[in-house]
Image: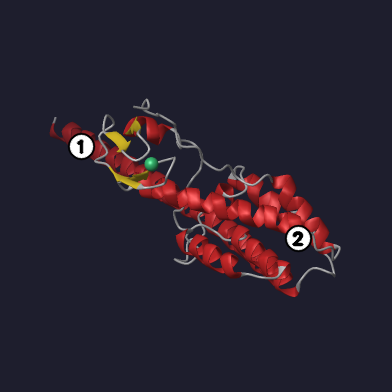
Protein backbone atom coordinates (compact mmCIF):
# COMPACT_ATOMS: atom_id res chain seq x y z
CA UNK A 1 0.00 0.00 0.00
CA UNK A 2 1.33 3.46 -0.88
CA UNK A 3 1.87 5.93 1.92
CA UNK A 4 -0.58 8.76 2.52
CA UNK A 5 0.16 12.00 0.70
CA UNK A 6 -0.18 15.34 2.44
CA UNK A 7 0.56 17.80 -0.38
CA UNK A 8 -0.47 21.34 0.39
CA UNK A 9 -2.40 22.96 -2.44
CA UNK A 10 -0.43 25.57 -4.38
CA UNK A 11 -1.97 28.81 -5.65
CA UNK A 12 -1.25 30.91 -8.73
CA UNK A 13 0.29 34.29 -7.92
CA UNK A 14 -0.68 37.67 -9.31
CA UNK A 15 0.55 38.75 -12.76
CA UNK A 16 3.84 40.69 -12.52
CA UNK A 17 3.29 44.37 -13.23
CA UNK A 18 6.26 44.65 -15.60
CA UNK A 19 4.54 42.17 -17.92
CA UNK A 20 1.41 44.34 -18.04
CA UNK A 21 3.52 47.47 -18.59
CA UNK A 22 5.31 45.79 -21.51
CA UNK A 23 2.02 44.69 -22.99
CA UNK A 24 0.74 48.29 -23.11
CA UNK A 25 4.04 49.68 -24.34
CA UNK A 26 3.91 47.33 -27.32
CA UNK A 27 0.22 47.90 -27.94
CA UNK A 28 0.76 51.67 -27.99
CA UNK A 29 3.40 51.17 -30.69
CA UNK A 30 1.07 48.96 -32.71
CA UNK A 31 3.17 45.83 -32.01
CA UNK A 32 1.10 42.68 -31.57
CA UNK A 33 3.05 40.30 -29.30
CA UNK A 34 0.77 37.27 -29.32
CA UNK A 35 3.00 35.29 -27.01
CA UNK A 36 2.98 38.00 -24.34
CA UNK A 37 -0.78 38.53 -24.69
CA UNK A 38 -1.32 34.80 -24.13
CA UNK A 39 1.12 34.71 -21.23
CA UNK A 40 -0.78 37.47 -19.43
CA UNK A 41 -4.21 36.33 -20.59
CA UNK A 42 -3.77 32.70 -19.57
CA UNK A 43 -2.03 33.78 -16.36
CA UNK A 44 -5.20 35.69 -15.50
CA UNK A 45 -7.37 32.67 -16.37
CA UNK A 46 -5.40 30.46 -13.97
CA UNK A 47 -5.38 33.13 -11.28
CA UNK A 48 -9.18 33.49 -11.55
CA UNK A 49 -9.66 29.73 -11.42
CA UNK A 50 -7.70 29.70 -8.15
CA UNK A 51 -9.67 32.66 -6.79
CA UNK A 52 -12.87 30.66 -7.32
CA UNK A 53 -11.28 27.51 -5.89
CA UNK A 54 -10.36 29.38 -2.68
CA UNK A 55 -13.86 30.87 -2.57
CA UNK A 56 -15.44 27.39 -2.85
CA UNK A 57 -13.13 26.03 -0.15
CA UNK A 58 -14.18 28.88 2.13
CA UNK A 59 -17.81 28.01 1.50
CA UNK A 60 -17.41 24.36 2.43
CA UNK A 61 -16.16 22.66 -0.74
CA UNK A 62 -12.40 22.15 -0.88
CA UNK A 63 -10.71 20.17 -3.66
CA UNK A 64 -8.03 17.53 -3.82
CA UNK A 65 -4.79 19.24 -4.97
CA UNK A 66 -3.91 16.20 -7.08
CA UNK A 67 -7.07 15.18 -8.92
CA UNK A 68 -9.26 18.25 -8.18
CA UNK A 69 -12.22 16.21 -6.95
CA UNK A 70 -14.46 18.06 -4.54
CA UNK A 71 -14.29 17.37 -0.80
CA UNK A 72 -16.91 18.87 1.49
CA UNK A 73 -15.95 19.89 5.01
CA UNK A 74 -17.62 21.35 8.11
CA UNK A 75 -15.12 24.19 8.86
CA UNK A 76 -13.79 22.42 11.95
CA UNK A 77 -10.04 23.21 11.88
CA UNK A 78 -9.28 19.55 12.63
CA UNK A 79 -11.61 18.21 9.93
CA UNK A 80 -9.55 15.85 7.79
CA UNK A 81 -10.01 16.49 4.08
CA UNK A 82 -9.45 13.21 2.32
CA UNK A 83 -9.33 11.93 -1.26
CA UNK A 84 -9.40 8.14 -1.39
CA UNK A 85 -8.46 7.87 -5.06
CA UNK A 86 -5.21 9.81 -4.47
CA UNK A 87 -4.70 8.60 -0.91
CA UNK A 88 -4.28 12.26 0.06
CA UNK A 89 -5.35 13.97 3.25
CA UNK A 90 -4.87 17.27 5.05
CA UNK A 91 -6.63 18.95 7.99
CA UNK A 92 -8.87 21.86 6.94
CA UNK A 93 -6.80 24.31 9.05
CA UNK A 94 -3.67 23.42 7.05
CA UNK A 95 -5.51 23.65 3.75
CA UNK A 96 -6.92 27.06 4.63
CA UNK A 97 -3.49 28.30 5.73
CA UNK A 98 -2.14 27.51 2.26
CA UNK A 99 -4.11 30.36 0.65
CA UNK A 100 -4.12 32.81 3.56
CA UNK A 101 -2.78 36.26 2.61
CA UNK A 102 -2.61 35.37 -1.09
CA UNK A 103 -5.27 37.92 -2.07
CA UNK A 104 -7.47 35.29 -3.71
CA UNK A 105 -10.51 37.55 -3.44
CA UNK A 106 -13.57 37.67 -5.67
CA UNK A 107 -15.76 40.07 -3.65
CA UNK A 108 -17.52 42.54 -5.90
CA UNK A 109 -15.60 41.22 -8.91
CA UNK A 110 -17.29 37.83 -9.39
CA UNK A 111 -19.36 38.82 -12.42
CA UNK A 112 -16.35 40.40 -14.18
CA UNK A 113 -14.10 37.43 -13.44
CA UNK A 114 -16.72 35.03 -14.82
CA UNK A 115 -17.25 37.18 -17.87
CA UNK A 116 -13.51 37.23 -18.56
CA UNK A 117 -13.19 33.44 -18.27
CA UNK A 118 -16.16 32.82 -20.58
CA UNK A 119 -15.05 35.28 -23.25
CA UNK A 120 -11.32 34.60 -23.12
CA UNK A 121 -11.86 30.88 -23.67
CA UNK A 122 -13.53 31.52 -27.01
CA UNK A 123 -11.56 34.61 -28.08
CA UNK A 124 -9.61 34.03 -31.28
CA UNK A 125 -7.65 37.11 -32.25
CA UNK A 126 -4.90 38.65 -30.09
CA UNK A 127 -6.74 42.01 -30.36
CA UNK A 128 -9.86 40.46 -28.84
CA UNK A 129 -7.79 38.97 -26.02
CA UNK A 130 -6.02 42.27 -25.38
CA UNK A 131 -9.37 44.05 -25.02
CA UNK A 132 -10.59 41.40 -22.55
CA UNK A 133 -7.43 41.77 -20.44
CA UNK A 134 -7.72 45.54 -20.60
CA UNK A 135 -11.39 45.56 -19.59
CA UNK A 136 -10.80 43.21 -16.66
CA UNK A 137 -7.84 44.98 -15.07
CA UNK A 138 -9.68 48.31 -15.18
CA UNK A 139 -12.66 47.11 -13.15
CA UNK A 140 -13.48 48.28 -9.65
CA UNK A 141 -14.73 46.12 -6.80
CA UNK A 142 -18.52 46.48 -6.48
CA UNK A 143 -18.62 48.60 -9.64
CA UNK A 144 -21.85 46.91 -10.80
CA UNK A 145 -23.55 47.78 -7.52
CA UNK A 146 -22.52 51.43 -7.82
CA UNK A 147 -19.79 51.25 -5.19
CA UNK A 148 -16.21 51.91 -6.23
CA UNK A 149 -14.48 50.38 -3.24
CA UNK A 150 -11.08 49.56 -4.74
CA UNK A 151 -9.38 48.54 -7.96
CA UNK A 152 -10.09 44.91 -8.82
CA UNK A 153 -6.57 44.67 -10.21
CA UNK A 154 -5.13 44.58 -6.70
CA UNK A 155 -6.01 40.87 -6.59
CA UNK A 156 -4.90 40.26 -10.18
CA UNK A 157 -1.68 42.21 -10.68
CA UNK A 158 -0.81 43.09 -7.12
CA UNK A 159 0.06 46.12 -5.01
CA UNK A 160 -1.73 48.38 -2.57
CA UNK A 161 -4.85 50.06 -4.01
CA UNK A 162 -3.08 53.43 -4.44
CA UNK A 163 -0.10 51.74 -6.14
CA UNK A 164 -2.38 49.81 -8.47
CA UNK A 165 -4.22 53.00 -9.43
CA UNK A 166 -0.94 54.85 -10.08
CA UNK A 167 0.38 51.93 -12.08
CA UNK A 168 -2.73 51.73 -14.27
CA UNK A 169 -2.77 55.52 -14.67
CA UNK A 170 0.74 55.39 -16.12
CA UNK A 171 0.31 52.61 -18.68
CA UNK A 172 1.36 53.52 -22.20
CA UNK A 173 -1.14 54.62 -24.77
CA UNK A 174 -0.63 55.99 -28.23
CA UNK A 175 -2.32 56.77 -31.50
CA UNK A 176 -1.89 53.11 -32.46
CA UNK A 177 -3.76 51.88 -29.37
CA UNK A 178 -7.09 50.22 -30.10
CA UNK A 179 -10.04 52.69 -29.82
CA UNK A 180 -11.80 50.32 -27.42
CA UNK A 181 -8.75 50.36 -25.18
CA UNK A 182 -8.65 54.16 -25.31
CA UNK A 183 -12.35 54.26 -24.40
CA UNK A 184 -11.76 51.94 -21.41
CA UNK A 185 -8.93 54.25 -20.33
CA UNK A 186 -11.30 57.23 -20.32
CA UNK A 187 -13.88 55.27 -18.33
CA UNK A 188 -11.14 54.22 -15.91
CA UNK A 189 -10.03 57.82 -15.34
CA UNK A 190 -13.66 58.77 -14.67
CA UNK A 191 -14.00 55.92 -12.17
CA UNK A 192 -10.81 56.93 -10.37
CA UNK A 193 -12.08 60.52 -10.15
CA UNK A 194 -15.51 59.39 -8.91
CA UNK A 195 -14.03 57.06 -6.28
CA UNK A 196 -11.68 59.81 -5.06
CA UNK A 197 -14.57 62.29 -4.86
CA UNK A 198 -16.58 59.71 -2.96
CA UNK A 199 -13.72 59.21 -0.50
CA UNK A 200 -13.26 62.99 -0.15
CA UNK A 201 -16.97 63.59 0.46
CA UNK A 202 -16.98 60.79 3.06
CA UNK A 203 -14.14 62.62 4.86
CA UNK A 204 -16.05 65.93 4.64
CA UNK A 205 -19.20 64.26 5.99
CA UNK A 206 -17.24 62.83 8.92
CA UNK A 207 -15.75 66.29 9.63
CA UNK A 208 -19.18 67.93 9.42
CA UNK A 209 -20.60 65.45 11.93
CA UNK A 210 -17.63 65.94 14.26
CA UNK A 211 -18.12 69.74 14.08
CA UNK A 212 -21.85 69.36 14.82
CA UNK A 213 -20.99 67.23 17.85
CA UNK A 214 -18.48 69.83 19.07
CA UNK A 215 -21.05 72.62 18.69
CA UNK A 216 -23.70 70.63 20.58
CA UNK A 217 -21.26 69.91 23.40
CA UNK A 218 -20.30 73.60 23.60
CA UNK A 219 -23.97 74.62 23.67
CA UNK A 220 -24.69 72.12 26.46
CA UNK A 221 -21.73 73.39 28.49
CA UNK A 222 -22.92 77.00 28.04
CA UNK A 223 -26.46 76.13 29.19
CA UNK A 224 -25.17 74.21 32.20
CA UNK A 225 -23.00 77.17 33.16
CA UNK A 226 -26.00 79.50 32.89
CA UNK A 227 -28.17 77.13 34.98
CA UNK A 228 -25.45 76.93 37.61
CA UNK A 229 -25.20 80.70 37.68
CA UNK A 230 -28.97 81.04 38.04
CA UNK A 231 -29.03 78.47 40.84
CA UNK A 232 -26.23 80.28 42.67
CA UNK A 233 -28.04 83.61 42.26
CA UNK A 234 -31.27 81.97 43.57
CA UNK A 235 -29.51 80.53 46.62
CA UNK A 236 -27.89 83.88 47.30
CA UNK A 237 -31.32 85.56 47.09
CA UNK A 238 -32.76 83.19 49.72
CA UNK A 239 -30.20 84.25 52.34
ZN1 LIG B 1 -7.57 13.21 -5.51
Residue identifier under label 1: 231
Q: Is residue 175 left or right of residue 158?
A: right
Secondary structure type for disc 1: helix
Q: Which residue is nearer to you in this view: 185 or 221?
A: 185
Residue identifier under label 2: 34
Which quadrant of the view contains residue 231? top left
Horizontal and vertical percent for residue 43?
62, 51
Horizontal and vertical percent for residue 12?
55, 43
Q: Which residue is nearer to you in this view: 20 or 216?
A: 20
Which quadrant of the view contains residue 54? top left
Horizontal and vertical percent for residue 152?
55, 54
Q: Which residue is nearer to you in this view: 109 or 27?
A: 27
182 to 196, vertically: above or below: below
Q: Quadrant of ligand 1?
A: top left
119 to 165, vertically: above or below: below
Per the model, the C-alpha gap separating discs 2 and 1 is 87 Å
Q: Is residue 154 left or right of residue 216?
A: right
Which numbered disc flags the more N-terminal residue, 2 or 1?
2
Q: What residue is shown at x 25% (from left), y 36% (from top)?
A: 228
Q: How many marks?
A: 2
Residue located farthest toward the left when viewing the structure as drawn: 238
Q: What residue is shown at x 34% (from left), y 32% (from top)?
A: 89
Residue located farthest toward the front when viewing the structure as drawn: 1
Q: Is residue 124 left or right of residue 116?
A: right
Picture quarter with the C terminus: top left
Q: Which coloring applies here?
A: secondary structure
Amino acid sequence: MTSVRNDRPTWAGRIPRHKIAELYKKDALGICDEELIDEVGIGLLVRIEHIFRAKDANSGIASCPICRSEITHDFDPEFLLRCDSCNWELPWAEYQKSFKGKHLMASGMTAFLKEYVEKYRVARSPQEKMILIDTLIHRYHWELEGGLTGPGARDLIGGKPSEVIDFLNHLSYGTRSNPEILATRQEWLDKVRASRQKAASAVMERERKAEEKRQKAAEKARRNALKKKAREAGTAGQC
